[in-house]
Image: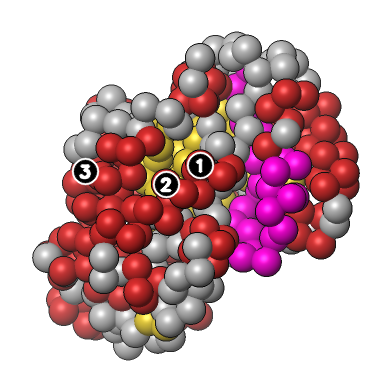
């Protein structure tokens, strides 16, 4: 049985021979480990693909998010300036538009026709060619709400939720279509099993459940529905404390939810167990970054104990992790493949 088989069983809520163990995100860790920069890699699809393939050979993921570290590029293609000269995840240094009155200047075509979009697409497909039979591959990208925040700027988006909700809805409708256009092109490869939508701005630490229902749920639900109709897997990642949103996630119906350590796994299981696969939730900046391997194993065991013996669980970090995480700590987490039998 391959890593891919084990992860697929968990997502389908079928009891696997062991608990799947993986890294979510990790793009800057992969790039840093390879001694590359994002700017360099975004000029060559073969080099970009090779970084992810080599990372898989070292780590042994049961599930891999391709596109990790690259999430800001679609917003950059729409006009956001970007800083990508190092192995740190590329950072947008400004918005694409100054106000919602400039929405007409944006279009999905600006993303799909950008030369670097073709580099990303080819790299994703090269990764799938190489390791798509061995590990479950999901594209990862920002979700519609977070993409809107990148385009307009977070502060302006938060103000506009109250001051101009109709235009915000128009913007998020556009970002939904951009997300789907990218997803379709990447998932056209038969060995790419689905897509993860990351929504850090939709955290319960950032917006209320009321605003989540209005500006996040309908658009994620649409993308999840389209993904299911395409016979692919859908996953959602929400940063921070998403406990108040768990029942909303049930309504959205992704195959899996990735959550941070702020969410109690027992509570997540109480709400989602047997209905949606849960992935999490070691702290990416705690002992995983600064502790010793035995500390990582101790925290991983606590996660396994919190979830219990039921299927529908993937052991992983709760969010993206710094490039400085020691390899031996990554390997310690992966050693839980032997301990995580069910």
Residue 57, label in figure: 1
Residue 51 placement: quadrant: bottom left
Residue 211 in the image, given as x and y percentages of width and height: 51, 57
Q: Element under label 1?
A: helix
Residue 329 belongs to magenta span: yes
- Specify start and end residues of the magenta stretch as a single range: 311-333
Tell which tag, 1 or 3, sits nearer the viewer.
Answer: 1
x, y percent for residue 159:
48, 78
Q: Position of residue 256 (x, y in %)?
A: 51, 33
In front: mark 3 or mark 2? Answer: 2
Which residue is under mark 2? 53
Q: Earlier in the sequence, mark 1 or mark 3?
A: 1
> Pointer 1: residues within 10 angstroms few (<14), some, or many (20+)?
few
How many residues crowd mark 3 within 10 Å: few (<14), some (14–19), many (20+)? some
Count of numbered labels shown in the rendering:
3
Residue occupying the point 40% across, 62% down:
71
How is the model colour-coded?
Answer: secondary structure
**168 horizontally vs 257: left or right:** left
Q: Which mark is residue 184?
A: 3
Q: Is residue 27 left or right of residue 297?
A: left
């Amino acid at each position: 049985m391959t890593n891919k088989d084990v992860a697929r069983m968990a997502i389908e809520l079928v009891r696997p021979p062991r608990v799947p163990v993986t890294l979510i995100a990790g793009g800057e860790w992969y790039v840093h480990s390879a001694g590359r920069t994002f700017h360099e890699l975004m000029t060559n699809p073969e080099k970009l693909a090779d970084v992810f393939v080599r990372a898989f050979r070292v780590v042994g993921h049961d599930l891999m998010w391709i596109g990790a570290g690259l999430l800001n590029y679609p917003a950059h293609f729409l006009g956001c300036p970007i800083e990508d000269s190092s192995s740190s995840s590329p950072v947008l240094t400004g918005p694409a538009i100054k106000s919602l009155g400039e929405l007409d200047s944006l279009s999905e075509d600006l993303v799909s026709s950008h030369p670097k979009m073709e580099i990303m697409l080819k790299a994703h497909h090269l990764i799938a060619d190489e390791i798509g039979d061995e590990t479950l591959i999901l594209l990862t990208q920002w979700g519609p709400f977070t993409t809107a925040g990148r385009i307009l700027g977070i502060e302006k988006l938060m103000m506009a939720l109250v001051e101009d909700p109709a235009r915000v809805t128009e913007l998020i409708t556009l970002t939904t279509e951009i997300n789907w256009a990218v997803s379709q092109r990447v998932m056209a490869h038969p060995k790419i099993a689905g897509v993860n939508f990351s929504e850090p701005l939709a955290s319960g630490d950032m917006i209320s459940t009321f605003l989540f229902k209005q500006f996040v749920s309908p658009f994620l639900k649409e993308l999840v529905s389209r993904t299911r109709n395409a016979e692919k897997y859908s996953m959602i990642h929400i940063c921070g404390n998403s406990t108040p949103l768990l029942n909303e996630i049930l309504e959205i119906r992704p195959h899996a939810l990735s959550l941070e350590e702020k969410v109690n796994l027992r509570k997540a299981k109480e709400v989602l167990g047997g209905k949606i696969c849960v992935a999490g939730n070691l702290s990416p900046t705690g002992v995983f970054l600064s502790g010793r391997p035995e500390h990582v194993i101790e925290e991983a065991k606590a996660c396994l104990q919190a979830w219990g013996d039921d299927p529908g669980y993937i052991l992983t970090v709760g969010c993206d992790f710094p490039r400085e995480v020691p390899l031996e700590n990554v390997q310690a987490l992966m050693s839980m493949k032997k301990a995580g039998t069910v």
